[in-house]
Amino acid sequence: MTELTLVQAVNRGLAEAMRQDADVLLLGEDIGTNGGVFRATEGLQKEFGAERVIDTPLSECGIVGTAIGMALYGLKPVAEIQFLDFIYPAFDQIVSELSKFRYRSGGQYPCHVVVRAPYGGGIRGGLYHSQSTEAFFCHTAGLKVVIPSTPADAKGLLLTAIHDEDPVMFLEPKRIYRSVTGEVPDGDYRIPFGKARIAREGTDLTLVAYGAMMVPTLAAAERLAEDGLSAEVIDLRTLVPLDEAALLASVEKTGRLVIVHEAARTAGFGAEIAALVAEKALYSLKAPILRVTGYDTPFPYALEHLYLPSEERILDAARQVGRTG
Amino acid sequence: MANATLTPDARVSSGEFDLPPSAWVEAYRTMVLARAMDERCLSLQRQGRIGFYVPLEGQEAAQVGCALALDPKDWVFPAYRELGVALVRGVPIQELLDQFIGNSGDRLKGRQMPNHYGYRAQNFVVASSPLGTQIPQAVGAALAARRRGDAVVTVAFFGDGSTSTNDFHAGLNFAGVYRSPTIFFCQNNQWAISMPRSHQTMSATLAEKAEAYGFGGVVVDGTDLGQVYRAVATARARALAGDGPTLIEAQVYRFGPHSTSDDPKRYRSDAEVAEWRRRDPLLRTKEEIMKTPGWTEAQDTALWTEARSRIAEAWKAAEGTPPLPPTSFLDDVFSERTPQLEHQRRELLGLLERKVVHE
């Protein structure tokens, strides 16, 4: 075990995968000599060489398109998109190509690329360094969508992603890249997809979150305990595949659900969770489902503290449902 | 009419990279088969027996010449008009006709429109409809092959319209930077649906775009089988020698519509088509073959008869092949079904059982 930040855990995960398997290689902008703008790939080019940690021209479409070709041939490329906000030039390659290769070929051409991208707000990054658009990818059949919230999960889920057989969008909560630290196992270990983490057990209400939102959500749960409300906190870890069983079991137990994400509310992933609970656990509910989310605006710069769900907002919503029923 | 004058770049080296005389008849046979497929499939589409078709008529020499210069180990990244390439690579017409119907014999399991096929056994990567996306993919596969130490080149097929896409720029730029063993084979068929080549770009040729990416581009007469073969064989040897990628612009003409969904009379003149038909690649190739001692008109007729009967037979088998199992469209989204997909599969089975929906 080693105490690491989340971004260091990503780095160790990449290094571990590359040591194990010569087919694993990285490509992206500024990831080699510079070690990545967030230092996620620090030292890797030195250890593995420029043929495996490839600095690319400034073209997201080129990065993902090239990674797809490498994967079709049998390599295991991990593409870095510098910020999720800049992924759109590669959107066609991801949505039209990467996600559909296995399907459209009748299974002849699996296409396993991991696309890593830092996402989310709270770093004073404004419109184009803050977005949380995971729902686009969840809505695209054929992509797995993974969002870790702890250093240990970041490494374990990343190793699973790299050894998976399907395309994986690996979205890293950059707001907590350095602010969250934790014990991380050394060597190789895999955290399975589709298994949520019960971050805190409780009986009165369920709080569901993922990624950077786990921090204010857990803090809110702590405050709720002081009020005498026992909140269960679920970290989804992977949105696709989704651990429906863990979600439904918790709601059946508590009867109250608050969903937290920093993405805009309309058609955000919270809507999917709410619909699922309405379909499969409606009669367990003692109160309306509430969503604490970003607003339906582009991501604001100066007032981002009001846009982002905070401990206080989560607490407010939790108290509303906690008093109901 | 669009300018088909060749630049001096077309004079690629000859001799070492010439299509061997013995290969001409076989090449011609494949070209005839491709055109006979067009003939039959356009008719099947009009009868409503297949849903859609993309003809290649006019581009046979470019495709067959290019494909013959490749090794079976090389990887083809096609667009959706590469029937001639598929035939040279050895894709059986039965596979193609099954794909056009989307029956249970379709290796792609009915997932795609006609012409959007791919066959792993022939290193013929599965096509898609978005234009140009295969170009950076071909570069990635070439880099992977080089990393593995394989003597393999990749070939990206696309048309004049695709040279305007983001992916064309990204792909050629990456290829230049990494000197990937890739051939960019552009069939400039003069029309991107209704947009003429003259309006697609102000570049004098498409091939000259390669220069900006730091490698060579050549223009060839795509109706001349020998010239295409020579250009591709040369580019392949260069790629394998580590001399990087090549952009080849094969100037051809699409005699038919873009697809069965458009009427070219709306955007181009009969006179233009007639002018290009004088350079029909099948006629040009036949003229060459007629120089072969002992080759007769009767042999030519026999080739056509053979092609048509092979197609008729394969079509009969394709029509007699049962449809796909109804839940098969829920497979191959991932390597394994997610719980959500499994749930949806059971939902569909229930709907079928209750006869809410029908096979």
Image (spheres, coloured by chain):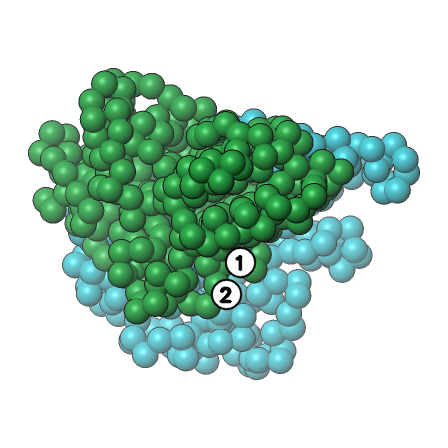
Spatial distance from mark 2 to mark 1, Cα to Cα?
Answer: 6 Å
Q: Residue at x 41, y 24 (%)?
A: A191
Label 2 marks a residue whose chain is A
The C terminus of chain A - image quarter:
top right
Q: As drawn, is A218 to the left or to the right of B49?
A: left
Question: In the image, which lettered chain appears green?
Answer: A
Q: Are marks 2 and 1 in contact (CB under 8 Å)?
A: yes
Kind of residue indicated by mark 1:
Arg
Q: Residue B78 versus residue A117: which sits nearer the camera? A: A117
Q: Which residue is mark 1?
A: A265
Q: Provide residue A94's location: percent of width, then percent of height.
A: 44, 49
Kind of residue indicated by mark 2:
Asp
- On screen, residue B111 above or below A162: below
Asked if residue A177 can be seen in this view, the reply is: yes
Q: Residue B25 versus residue A267: which sits nearer the camera? A: A267
Query: Which comes sooner in the sequence, label 2 or label 1?
Result: 1
Q: As drawn, is A140 to the left or to the right of A310?
A: right
Question: In the image, which lettered chain appears cyan?
Answer: B
The N terminus of chain A - image quarter:
top left
Q: Which mark is residue A296?
A: 2
**Label 1 secondary element:** loop
